Amino acid sequence: MTDRSPTIEDRARAVFTARAHCYVASSSHTDPQVLGWLVELAQPRPSWRMLDVATGAGHTAFAFAPYVDEIIGIDLTPRMLAEAEKLAEQQGVTNVRFVVADIHELPFDDETFDDEQFDLVTCRRAAHHFSGIQEALTEMVRMLKPQGLLLIDDRCVPEDDFVDSVMNRLDWLHDESHVREYRPSQWQAMLEAAGCRVVTLATYIRHRPLTSLTECVSPQNVAQIHGILDSLSPVQRQKLALEEKEGALYSNHWYLLIAAQKIGG
Ligand SMILES: C[S@@+](CC[C@H](N)C(=O)[O-])C[C@H]1O[C@@H](n2cnc3c(N)ncnc32)[C@H](O)[C@@H]1O
């Protein structure tokens, strides 16, 4: 028997299996404002077929379910999809189907994933986990109909070397399956390389408590997160908007929202 080291996908599956319950009612993942922005950007039509990539507990799929015909939600982690199935039943959602799949290795014998099947592909709060982001984007675009819409919502970093490196390190300590949160300029280039025209690219910030980084995390990694924050200079603290409010530490987290259209057709 040959031993192999765990891949990023093995790590993601392990992390999300252990933490699946944390995503069911997570205030960040159920944030109605952000889900509303996505629906507003897409202007979905009742005839549309939608693919929700890395659907997790299904919050994005459920936000679109009243407006489209059919949704396929894929995810690497069966345990997350079990939570999504439960929520679908509780909410009476009947037009969403969940499939276990890795966006880098879609089952080629399943016609669901043939070329140009979908009017809309969404991928929310997940792309920073993908081991091959360019390949993943190319797969998403392959499955879109010509002129179809790709919507991305993800953590990002501003165009600042310090914030880029510290936020990526903190997020890796929060979740060791974290690969990278990208700068807006990198997103623009990756989407163009995947065959899309970026229609909207907007960033937004949430000032979040430190618990959003330390919750469900091992004591060793929590200690490292505190060590990094304690070592920051006043200028660096300011760049993260790190401050104490009502006895708790808060800092900025950066996000981005993209609507991109598949070129061609
Ligand atoms: C934070 S959750 C997603 C949240 C969800 N999209 C939402 O809007 O609430 C991240 C998900 O990405 C999934 N994931 C990570 N890598 C993946 C991959 N390569 N292919 C498919 N899913 C993946 C994880 O299993 C996890 O469920």
Image (cartoon, rainbow, N blue to C red):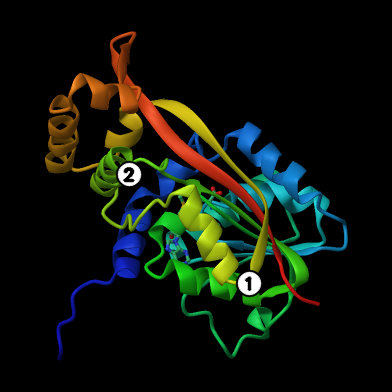
Q: Residue at x 54, y 34 (%)?
A: 204
| Residue 249 locus on image (x, y percent) | 29, 19
Q: Residues within 10 Å of mark 2 (few under 14, many from 20)?
A: some
Label number found at residue 164: 2
Amino acid found under the numbered disc labelled 1: Gly
- Location of residue 72 (image quadrant): bottom right
Instruction: Report whether 70 appears left or right of 194.
Output: right
Indicate whether 90 appears above or below 8: above
For marks 2 and 1, give the CA distance: 26 Å
- For label 1, the residue is 195
What residue is drawn where x is 67% and y is 85%? 111
**Residue 203 point in image, percent of width and height:** 55, 39
Q: Residue at x 78, y 68 (%)?
A: 147
- Check the picture and name the quadrant holding the N terminus: bottom left
Residue at the spot 54% in from the left edge and 68% down from the top edge: 137
In the image, the residue with mark 2 has its CB under 8 Å from the nearest atom of ligand 1: no
Residue closest to the eye, 45 or 81 = 45
Given the current orientation, which residue lies at the most extreme top position?
A: 246
Q: Considering the image in quadrants, where does the C terminus appear?
A: bottom right
Res 5 seen here = yes
Give the quarter of the image for residue 13: bottom left
Instruction: Return the x and y of residue 170 as percentages of the image width and height.
Output: 26, 41
